[in-house]
């Protein structure tokens, strides 16, 4: 008989999220699963670069000391952890994880499942040779246009290998580029015994995963509606999904934590990164977000029900990153009086000097922070009495040399431009490589996830 409910706690919304959140989720109340989402699209290229410099790297390093802290609790309370922290070096992540388990004296008590198969970087030449265009979903351009600049290529894998890892008693499941929502709905499929064709139920799990995937954004963080009234964000509680076998679930958080779970906060998260709400596509099903029903059933408790779904497509999404040139950003702060006029004048002086030097860029972008950097032309004319404004100028080019020369032209404005510059520190602007995102589709039959389960030595 399936369990009546399970509690699936969100512990990280991105790599760099609140480090204490997973610890609080484990220790401040009962949960069955802790899910940790580390990977954004461009994160994979960052990890690939790290591994190219050091073969031992290439995974979310914050994950290892975190697990060293909470593993004893997870073992004692049978809390299972699912994380896409493996990045592009799942074996390295696994070995480090087993290492901290041994250091914690947990020999023979930690089974780690590792899901591979999402990384197709080395397979790209063969896929192209066999006719897979991997065309950009936004522009239609074939991958061959940038193949010599590709840094990473990862297919989004669904729930099946995670479910298998749980069925093989893995306490911790580590994936690479799993779809974010699968981290939450995989334990629902496993616990409740849903079949791959239970599309309404899986769609409900997808919605639960979408609510969980951005951490405290569903429980009062970054909330627009009545934001001043959100209490105690210094101690914000991350969301917890209380899931039932019929697909309905309650969004809540631990008692005594800050933040708020309400119809408004949950709705704002549901709208996050939303395209066509009738077609939220994952590898396992398509969820229709227009069928979602929300109901407050108590303080910090929102019931979600009524979700409908249908069969997935025959494609999987592929996240590809590639080198797209170089950029640099320079800033100066101008103070009252006439702060905006001074910053505008400095911008024109800078552009004329760059032109006199014969420097050409693919783009030069100027923003005046404190006036129009957020709303652009919609900001209207600047107030006459702004106490300060930051001039921010960015350039990008396919070549490094002109960007490097640009970085030397910001500091001279301090003594050769308008007066009252302040806030210049840190030296010259840094030249950075631009990593661009290339979304594509691939026949799902080309992607075969693999699972390995290992245990600390007895």
Image: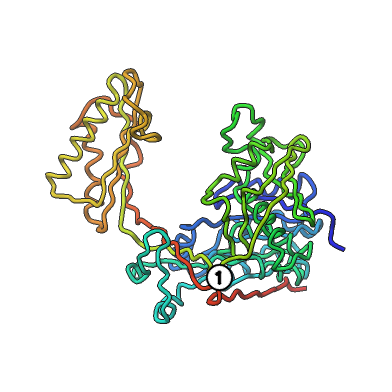
User: Could you tell me which quadrant the N terminus lies in?
Assistant: bottom right
Q: Badge 1 is on which residue?
A: 314
> Residue at 66% across / 32% down in the picture?
232
Tag 1 secondary structure: loop
User: Could you tell me which quadrant the C terminus lies in?
Assistant: bottom right
Query: Which image quadrant is residue 89 in?
Result: bottom right
Q: Is residue 268 above or below residue 157?
A: above
Q: Is residue 431 visible?
A: yes
> Residue at 74% across / 73% down in the picture?
457
Q: Is residue 319 above or below residue 5?
A: below
Left or right: where does residue 302 sit relative to residue 374? right
Query: Which image quadrant is residue 3 in?
Result: bottom right
User: Where in the figure is residue 181, as x and y percent of width and height?
Assistant: 62, 57
Judge the density around disc 1: few (<14), some (14-19), many (≥20) Cα neighbours within 10 Å. Answer: few
> Residue at 62% across / 41% down in the picture?
267
Left or right: where does residue 135 sit relative to residue 157? left
Visual colour scheme: rainbow
Please state which of residues 264 and 288 is positioned toward the viewer in this rendering.
288
């Amino acid at each position: 008989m399936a369990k009546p409910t399970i509690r699936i706690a969100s512990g990280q919304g991105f790599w760099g999220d609140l480090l204490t959140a997973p610890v609080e989720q484990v220790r401040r109340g009962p949960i069955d699963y802790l899910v940790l989402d580390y990977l954004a699209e461009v994160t994979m290229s960052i990890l690939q670069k790290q591994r190219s410099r050091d073969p031992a790297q290439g995974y979310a390093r914050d994950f290892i000391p975190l697990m060293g802290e909470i593993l004893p609790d997870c073992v004692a309370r049978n809390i299972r952890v699912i994380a896409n922290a493996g990045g592009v070096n799942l074996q390295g992540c696994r070995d480090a994880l087993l290492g901290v388990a041994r250091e914690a004296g947990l020999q023979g008590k930690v089974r780690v499942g590792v899901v591979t198969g999402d990384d197709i970087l080395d397979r790209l030449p063969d896929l192209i040779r066999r006719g897979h265009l991997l065309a950009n979903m936004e522009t239609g351009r074939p991958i061959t246009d940038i193949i010599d600049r590709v840094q990473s290529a990862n297919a989004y894998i669904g729930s099946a290998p995670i479910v298998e890892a749980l069925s093989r008693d893995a306490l911790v499941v580590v994936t690479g580029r799993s779809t974010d929502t699968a981290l939450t709905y995989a334990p629902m499929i496993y616990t409740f015994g849903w079949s791959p064709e239970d599309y309404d139920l899986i769609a409900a799990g997808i919605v639960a995963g979408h609510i969980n995937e951005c951490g405290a954004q569903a429980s009062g963080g970054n909330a627009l509606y009545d934001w001043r009234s959100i209490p105690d964000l210094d101690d914000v509680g991350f969301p917890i999904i209380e899931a039932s076998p019929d697909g309905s679930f309650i969004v809540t958080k631990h008692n005594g934590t800050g933040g708020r779970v309400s119809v408004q906060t949950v709705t704002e998260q549901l709208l996050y990164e939303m395209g066509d709400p009738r077609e939220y596509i994952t590898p396992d099903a398509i969820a229709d977000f227009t069928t979602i029903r929300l109901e407050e059933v108590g303080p910090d408790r929102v019931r979600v029900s009524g979700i409908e779904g249908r069969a997935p497509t025959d494609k999987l999404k592929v996240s590809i990153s590639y080198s797209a040139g170089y950029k640099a950003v320079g800033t100066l702060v101008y103070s009252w009086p006439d702060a905006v006029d001074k910053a505008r004048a400095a911008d024109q002086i800078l552009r004329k000097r760059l032109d006199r030097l014969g420097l050409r860029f693919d783009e030069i972008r100027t923003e005046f922070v404190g006036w129009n950097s957020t709303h652009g032309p919609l900001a209207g004319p600047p107030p006459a009495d702004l106490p300060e404004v930051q001039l921010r100028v960015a350039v990008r080019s396919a070549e490094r040399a002109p960007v490097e020369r640009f970085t030397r032209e910001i500091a001279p404005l301090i003594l050769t431009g308008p007066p009252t510059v302040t806030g210049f520190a840190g030296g010259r602007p840094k030249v950075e490589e631009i990593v661009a995102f290339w979304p594509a589709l691939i026949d799902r039959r080309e992607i075969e996830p693999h699972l390995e389960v290992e245990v600390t030595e007895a």
